[in-house]
Amino acid sequence: MNNLNAPEWYWKLAIAGGAFVALAVVGWLLWRLGKKLYVSYRATEEGIESMLLPYRACPNT
């Protein structure tokens, strides 16, 4: 079995910790982007529905 000394362990833990933090930041940014896109899509969809509502309420005669 390979026994690592303290500096090697610290180096490996620093790499693993940095990768974890980087993944957490990327995940948070993607979540924020998705939330903004979802709100934007909902607003656009509701805006279109509200514009079409008068035309749907009055059937063609």
Image (cartoon, grey):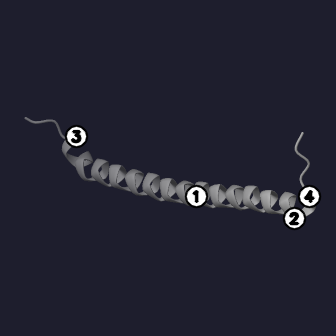
Which amino acid, by three-letter code, is at mark 4?
Asn
Image position, residue 53 (x, y; %): 26, 46
Badge 1 marks a residue whose secondary structure is helix
Structural distance between the alpha carbons of marks 2 and 1: 28 Å
According to the picture, the residue beneath numbered tag 3 turns out to be: 56
According to the picture, the residue beneath numbered tag 2 turns out to be: 7
Q: Residues within 10 Å of mark 4 (few under 14, many from 20)?
A: few
Image position of 9 (left or right of 52):
right
Looking at the image, is 55 positioned above or below residue 24?
Answer: above
- Cβ–Cβ below 8 Å for labels 2 and 4? yes
Which amino acid, by three-letter code, is at mark 2?
Pro
Image position, residue 24 (x, y; %): 66, 56
Structural distance between the alpha carbons of marks 4 and 3: 74 Å
According to the picture, the residue beneath numbered tag 1 turns out to be: 26
Q: Residue 43 has which mark?
A: none
Q: Nearer the viewer, mark 1 or mark 3?
A: 1
According to the picture, the residue beneath numbered tag 4 turns out to be: 5
Q: Residues within 10 Å of mark 3 (few under 14, many from 20)?
A: few
Q: Which of the marked residues, 4 or 3, is nearer the chain's N terminus?
A: 4
Quarter of the image where one finds residue 55: top left
Q: Nearer the viewer, mark 4 or mark 1?
A: 4
Structural distance between the alpha carbons of marks 2 and 4: 6 Å
